[in-house]
Amino acid sequence: MSTTKKHTVDDLQAIADRLTAEGVPTARGGKWHPVTVRNVLLSVVADVEARARAEAHRLAEAAQAVAV
């Protein structure tokens, strides 16, 4: 059973506030906003998923080559 929680705007705002307070730069050098945090998180997830698919494909090809 999954216990994942959907991020609320308040959660994303808290992250944005912390990043801004700690001086973590945005890509454009501005202040962090909830939507910016959301977009970065979605980008990271998409990258991890793409890498996992590529690795699964590589492993499948290697397994097929061994089976031949």
Image (spheres, rainbow, N blue to C red):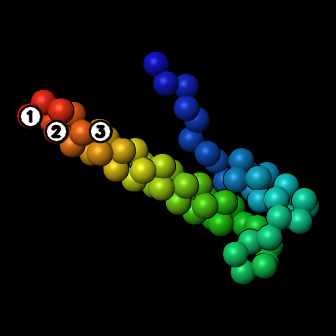
**Which numbered disc flags the more N-terminal residue, 2 or 3?**
3
Tell me if label 1 and label 2 are in contact, CB under 8 Å: yes
Amino acid type at circle 3 is Leu
**Which numbered disc flags the more N-terminal residue, 3 or 1?**
3
Q: Label 1 to label 2, Cα distance in Å? A: 5 Å
The residue singled out by tag 3 in the image is 59
Which element is circle 3 on?
helix
Query: In terms of depth relative to the viewer, which is nearer, 47 or 29?
Result: 47
The count of marks equals 3
Above or below, 25 against 55 in this view is: below
Q: Which residue shows up at 72% across the image and 66% down it?
A: 33
- Residue 5's quadrant in the figure? top right
Q: Residue furthest left?
A: 68
The residue singled out by tag 1 in the image is 68
Q: Residues within 10 Å of mark 3 (few under 14, many from 20)?
A: few
Q: Is residue 25 visible?
A: yes
